[in-house]
Amino acid sequence: MDALERVVKPKTKRAKRFLEKREPKLNENVKNAMLIKGGNANLTVTQVLRDVHALKKPYGVLYKKKNITRPFEDQTSLEFFSKKSDCSLFMFGSHNKKRPNNLVIGRMYDYHVLDMIELGIEKFVSLKDIKNSKCPEGTKPMLIFAGDDFDVTEDYRRLKSLLIDFFRGPTVSNIRLAGLEYVLHFTALNGKIYFRSYKLLLKKSGCRTPRIELEEMGPSLDLVLRRTHLASDDLYKLSMKMPKALKPKKKKNISHDTFGTTYGRIHMQKQDLSKLQTRKMKGLKKRPAERITEDQEKKSKKIKKN
């Protein structure tokens, strides 16, 4: 049995806390990414992995040593690293004659490869080459996707989902205007994917809303889609399943229309209008003749029942 698969009982409190962090939770931790160099990675691929790691900090692990593995042929080493580093996202860089400047981006489900897409780097500008100010570590980016392919083609649609998973960062409840510091822009055009990174500059506009300018920050990549390894529809649906405890409970007799107006239905018992209390006045009082006829009707009803 593999050392990572067997049941391990903690001997210290520190080990117990470590294992509790890795247990399944209703609200999972932020997804970490591992960046791995292949056995024949060149300087371009190595620099790309470093720049992506700089964008992902502190939710990324960069492996500095070369690892001889081929993700599309054997995925056991990736699954081993995923368990070891507790990472559900990965980026693998390699270079050879058949596939130069190669990047494989993917994600895990239950420590097994779910989706995997291979991209080729055609043009690259590093963070170091663009001499502008950079964003602080751990800043949550804004993601923009342009191009019809991201909504029409299945491979591009899955790539969009994968890139959102990879770069989204932690989930936040509130957004501060000053915290919107940089943008990651992905454009799909003529069979290529253009990846650009911009720093957001808020400048005076003479009114309450500031004027926004974009300043290229780096890295900059021109990518080509090569190979894909996508999960089946059933497995993909299973990975997206939400726990019952997190699902909002349905409220009875409440409905909403297209404009968002809430309607409620109230169930009441049948009201006896004869017992309704009205304003006391002489004109509404019953006459003696009316009382006599009502008493006779009541008596006749009792006789029929008997």
Image (tube, rainbow, N blue to C red):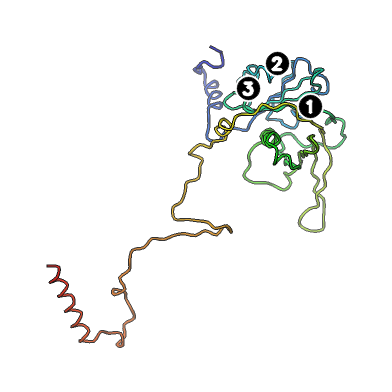
Q: Amino acid at mark 2?
A: Thr
Q: Relative to 191, is 262 on the left or the right?
A: left
Q: Position of residue 90 (x, y in %)?
A: 68, 26
Name the residue that disc number 1 marks.
120
* Residue 192 in the figure: left or right of residue 243: right
Task: Say few, some or many: other residues with alpha carbon within 10 Å of mark 2 (under 14 / 14 to 19 / 20 or more).
Answer: some
Q: Find residue 69 and name its label.
A: 2
Pointer 1 and pointer 3: residues touching (CB < 8 Å)? no
User: In this view of the protein, which residue sits in the foreground, 213 or 79?
Assistant: 79
Label 2 vs 3, first from the N-terminus: 2
Q: Residue at x 78, y 53 (%)?
A: 210
Tell me the distance, in whole angstroms, between the alpha carbons under discs 2 and 3: 14 Å
Image quarter hosting the C terminus: bottom left
Q: Considering only vertical position in the picture, is 12 above or below 194?
A: above
Task: Say whether disc 1 or disc 3 marks the residue closer to the N-terminus.
Answer: 3
Of the pair 219 and 155, the residue shown nearer to us? 155
Q: Which residue is mark 3?
A: 82
Label 2 sits on a secondary structure element that is loop
Above or below, 58 against 99 in this view is: below
In percent of the image, x 82 and y 44: which residue is there?
Answer: 214
Q: Residue at x 71, y 35 (%)?
A: 156
